[in-house]
Structures are given as C-alpha cells and as structure tokens.
Amino acid sequence: MQMELQKGVQRWVVDISQWNPSSQEFSHAMSFLPQHEHPSITGYVKLEDRKRAIVSRLLQYSLVHEVLGIPFNEIIIKRTLEGKPYLEHNKVDHEFPNFNFNASHHGDYVAIASEPLCIVGLDIVSHSIPGKETIPEFIQIFCSYFSRLEWDSIMNAGSCDDMLNEFYRYWCVKEAFVKAIGTGVGYRLDSVEFHHTRWTNIFVKLDGKELKGWRFWLYELGKRHMVSIAKGHPNNATETYKRTLKRTEFDEEHYHLGLHLPNVSFVQQTVEQLIPVSSKSRGVNFGQ
C-alpha cells in the first residue's frame, strides 16, 4: 500500500527566469488551459506576473495528468471560497484517498507539492530586500503576525540580514500551514507558533497547544529563495476545504502511513515539459 500511496507524493519546481517566451509561445502554452483560467493569467500587467500565473496553472494540470492519468481536457480544477484549488471529486483516483496539491510562486520560482492522504501546503519566499524602509522598519510592519517567542527569535537573530532571513523562515512555514488547511488571508497568524531546532524537527502550536500529526520542512531553493512544505490531518482543514476531500477520518495506523511517506526532492521542470506530449503540436480543445 505504501508503494501505491508514494506515487501521490510529488514535488515539482520551475525556474521562470529561464523561460522567455514570445507572445506566440505564451499563447500556445495558454491554449492547453481551459478558458476559465485565462483571465487569472491575462489580468496581470507585468510579464513576470503572467509567467508565474500560467506556470502555476500548468503545474497543477500537468501534475494531475501525470499522477492520475486524466487527459488534460478532462481535468476539472475548482477553488474553494477561500481560493484553495482542488480537483473535482469524481476525478480523484481511488488509490489516493485525498489526492490534493498546492502551488506557490515568488521571485524566480513556481512550485507544486501533492499528497495522497494528508492535506498539503507549500510556500515559496524570495528574500527580497526592502526598498524604502530599513530592514528593521520593514520587519516591524509585520510584528502582529508573530508570537512573542517567534518575534524574539527574529529580533535576536544577529545582523540585519540574519533578522531578515529568520523573518522569512517563519513567514514561509506559517504560510505553508495556512495554505494546507485552506484558510484565506484573514487567518490569525500570531495564533500559529512554530518551534524548531535550527529549523529541523519543526512543530507548531495552535493557540498554545501542540498540533499533533503534522510534519514541516524548510529548504533553501536556489539563490535567496526558500520553500516550506506542511502536511497534516484533513480534520484540521476548513469546512469548505473538507467538503472537497473524499475522507477526513482515518484510523491511527492508516494516517501514520500517509504522514510518514518519504518526502521526495523537488524535480526541476521546464515549461515545455508541462505540456502534454500528445498535444504539443496542437492546442487542446477545452469546453467552456
């Protein structure tokens, strides 16, 4: 059973700084996505933002196609009220009780993570240096999002660069957790307190109580980028997100198996690799 479930654990990443499409190439790539996805891509003014948006969508459709074998034009991805993407129920493979995924983009990278049983959240952070403010002034803007313990860790990290890096680490794991459970922007991030040993053995306390049955990872991803993955129990999902899942109750042994599936490394993908092989010479005809 572990071997079957393991196929549902995927980690893909695209470096969009390496993709410089012409208008025609961009339109061709977009032709593989359904019409309802197009406004969320073309609505951006800057090319970099459009690139991130289209690659995020292509990663989602390509990963579902690769893992579940569903043809591109039959994949139905919807979003909860809070904006969490999910695969429509009747398309989910019976081998994977809760196949779900989460994408993120920032800076040069767009990535996706999927899990077959646990809910999963992913966040990428580019270590951008503040423009007008000093680093301490920039960090201070976000102080209300951190617990006292987290804030002290950030403030006592060392140099300004060290403080900024520590700030982004906490921000990254918090965002991955919030995205895993499917909440929107208004979530009380200060109620989510992370503990760690030099950013290993990471665990979280929610309103002061340790949340069992969760795992977290934090990695460096290329130059001045980091990525965090959170995976945990479907019971912790928002009500709207729970309704998109096939199962929220598991016996302890079954859930332990899903929680402790090996966490695979990120596979570097190109945009060309995300386009289905059988369709590369022609656009896919999606229904409206």
Image (tube, rainbow, N blue to C red):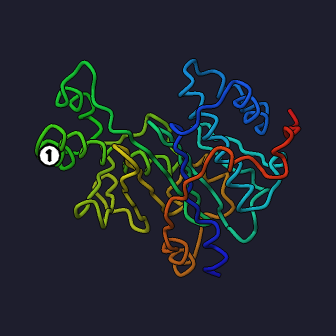
Instruction: Name the side, left or right, on which 124 lies relative to 53.
Output: left
**68, 282: nearer the viewer:** 282
Name the residue rendered at 54%, 20% in the picture. 46
Question: What residue is shown at x 48% (from left), y 74% (from top)?
Answer: 260
> What residue is drawn where x is 40% and y is 48%?
222
Q: Position of residue 48 (x, y in %)?
A: 53, 28
Q: Residue 70: x percent and y percent? A: 80, 56
Q: Quadrant of the C terminus?
A: top right
Question: Percent from the top left, x then y, of residue 259?
Answer: 50, 71
Above/below status of 22 relative to 90 = above
Please identify the quarter of the rendering in which residue 118 is found: bottom right
Toward which corner of the image does residue 171 lie, by quadrant?
A: top left
Task: State the residue in front, 209 or 36.
Answer: 36
> Which residue has dot 1 on it?
152
For residue 32, side relative to residue 181 (left or right):
right
Q: For mark 1, give the secondary structure.
A: helix
Few, some or many residues within 10 Å of mark 1 (<14, 14–19, 20+): few
- Height in image: 287 above or below 150? above
Q: Amino acid at mark 1?
A: Asp
- Seen from the viewer's position, the closer of residues 39 and 79 is 39
